[in-house]
Image (cartoon, rainbow, N blue to C red):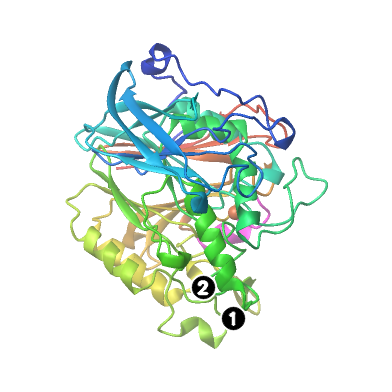
Amino acid sequence: MTTDTPFLRPRRRDLLAGSGALTFAGFTGAGERQAPTTLFPFGVASGDPLSDRCIIWTRLARTPLKADGGMPAKPVTVKWFVASASAPAKTLRRGEVRTRPGLGHSVHVDVTGLAPGQACRYWFEADGETSPGGLFRTSDPASDTCRLAVACCNNYEHGYFTAFDHIADLEPDVLFHAGDYIYEKAAKPGLPRQHIGGECMNLTDYRRRYAQYRLDPSMQRMHAAVPIIASWDDHEVAGNWAGMYDKQRSPVFAHRRKAAFQAFYEFMPVRARPAPGWTALQLYRAFTFGAGLRFFALDTRQYRSDQACGDKTQRPCDALHETDRTMLGAAQKSWLEGKLATLDGGWAVIGQQVPSYRQIVHDSEGPWISMDKWDGYPGAQADFHAMLARYTKGRTLVISGDSHAHYLSELRTDWGDPHTRFGMELTVTSVTSSGDGNERRESWEPLSAQNPHIIDHHDRRGFCLIEATRETLTIQPISFDKISQPGASALYRKRFEMT
Ligand SMILES: [Fe+2]
């Protein structure tokens, strides 16, 4: 059922007003020209909230765009503090960690022993300086509601992170980021903003790229206000990478992948234990929120088989149907199945990266298939959908990104039969990638005519809010008419309700 009633207007929690609010000490503006001199130029972030714990993050730097952050090659002691958000003088937890120069003086603390649904304020101290404050709330499985924001694809060069300002104002329980948090490519002239440096190939490059993105004030504001569940898609590493391969099957890709994994970990508030030598970083994980909502974050890049027949939207070839081709890898697939088997009738939200619904368009000579999406892995796609249909009792929402446009699709075990619907999939549009956009893409007409399960689309930039009660799950797309300039106002578009 759809309705266009306005929904989820921005609001500020009372606790912000009473807690001295957030400050961004030492930060005066965007970009490298006004780089701050505080020890905490990237601000703070939180992530992976569970009912009793949450990761809090910061990274020390005196010269934020330098690979070593302008920091000495020795550990620095950092004190951390977590207080009740409504009574900041009341410290709930505190502790001390020593940063490592090998991890770029990044700080990840898993703050444990908290109560469900507890709103917390946190900050750090080092070398006599105090960081800006941040807010998070632990998940509250007993609550009858939950609110998630969903976003992806924030190419710095393509525009301004207006979506992140709005997400900060909305203060959802969590933001799921479906990847392309950075883009690895070299600076291109003529765009609204410019990357610093060439294409990212080594740790120095990736660290500088994350640093540039993290100096963005809208990005900092969002991270200080909202915990994030971070995943990655291709551009955190290299365009269309797949497992151990980049597009060119470059012999040095394994080294590049390690550098990209390390920089991602250093800059993201994730609960993850990197493998020795950065040969792997497990990012699939599970969460429980209110309204009976279970959230499963998947990784469709690290374990997948190489694309068949090439990387693009192209004609199929025999390799497409090779039976051992995988998208999730055996371990992740079996982990997911184990989790799904424990569902007890609530909502199952599966956060991943590339669209899993059918998007195949035929012309007079045959089909065109996007080889980088689940359509390019038809055996794995059928298995994935069969598993969801088997365990989730129709209360399934899959989330994807990657497309730089908004789509909403039914999920069916038989695409030609609407009676086989077992859930929905939301492809969230980009924060900035692909620029201002239009109401619709030219490709929408043939795509929707040949794939009637895809029921909604827009080609503006923005994000989505998802609000769940035990009875309904509401998807609210929000867009901006312009992101090539800062400060656009938000348009609340037609929303969709699952019951
Ligand atoms: Fe993207």
Magenta residues, start to end: 441-451
Q: Residue at x 70, y 59 (%)?
A: 199
Circle 1: element type: loop
Rendering quarter of residue 476: top left
Q: Nearer the viewer, residue 312 or 444?
A: 312
Question: For the point 51% across and 49% down, which residue is it?
Answer: 101
Q: Is mark 1 within 8 Å of ligand 1?
A: no
What amino acid type is highlighted by mark number 1?
Cys
Residue at x 28%, y 50% (from the top left corner)? 395
To which residue does mark 1 refer?
309
Q: Nearer the viewer, residue 189 or 127?
A: 127
Query: Does residue 180 appear anywhere in the picture?
Result: yes
> In the displayed image of the protein, which residue is found farthest to the right?
190
Residue 125 position in % (x across, y down): 44, 28
Residue under the point 28% across and 33% down: 145
In the rendered image, which quarter contains the C terminus?
top left
The amino acid on which the numbered mark 2 sits, given as a three-letter code, is: Gly
Measured as percent of width and height from the top left, residue 249 is found at 61, 78
64 displayed left or right of 48: right
Give the residue pinned by disc 2: 376
Badge count: 2
